[in-house]
Amino acid sequence: MAKVKVSKFDIAEYLDDEVMIEEYLNNALEEGNTEDLIAAIGHIAKAKGMTRIASETGMSRPSLYKALAKGSKPQFETIQKVIKALGGNLSVNMG
C-alpha cells in the first residue's frame, strides 16, 4: 500500500483576497470569542506576511507571533496596530 502524504491545514493559505479576509474576520467577530478573534487576526497577518506586518506595527517578528499565539492576551493597542497594518479599521455600528 502506498503511503499518503498529508499536510497540516493552514487557513492562511486560503486568505488570498480582501473579500475572503473581511468575511473571515467578521465571522470571527460575530461568532467567536476573544481567543478566536486573536487567532483569526494571526492567520490574516500570516497570510499578508508577518515580516511586513511586524514592520508596520513597529513590533519585532517574534513579538508579533507571541502576541497572536494561542492563549495569548495581547493589549488592545497591539490589536489596533495589527488591524491597521492589515489595512483594516475598527468601527462601531449601534444600529
Image (tube, rainbow, N blue to C red):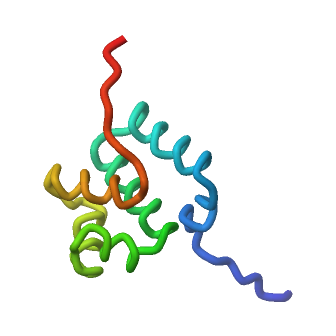
Q: Residue at x 36, y 70 (%)?
A: 53
Judged from this view, the residue extending furthest toward the right is 1
Q: Is residue 92 above or below residue 16?
A: above
Question: Looking at the picture, how far across and down is residue 54, in whole percent?
Answer: 31, 74
Seen from the viewer's position, the closer of residues 71 and 18 is: 18
Question: Looking at the picture, how far across and down is residue 21, in whole percent?
Answer: 54, 50
Question: Looking at the picture, how far across and down is residue 6, in whole percent?
Answer: 68, 77
Q: Judge from the rendering whether residue 50 lies leftward or rightward of residue 3; answer left or right.
A: left
Q: Residue at x 61, y 46 (%)?
A: 19
Image quarter where the C terminus lies is top left
Q: Judge from the rendering whether residue 92 lies leftward or rightward of residue 63; answer left or right.
A: right
Q: Residue at x 29, y 63 (%)?
A: 68
Question: Looking at the picture, how far across and down is residue 78, in whole percent?
Answer: 20, 58
Seen from the viewer's position, the closer of residues 24 and 7 is: 24
Image quarter where the N terminus lies is bottom right
Judged from this view, the residue extending furthest toward the top is 95
Q: Is residue 93 above or below residue 68?
A: above
- Say which quarter of the image contains residue 75: bottom left
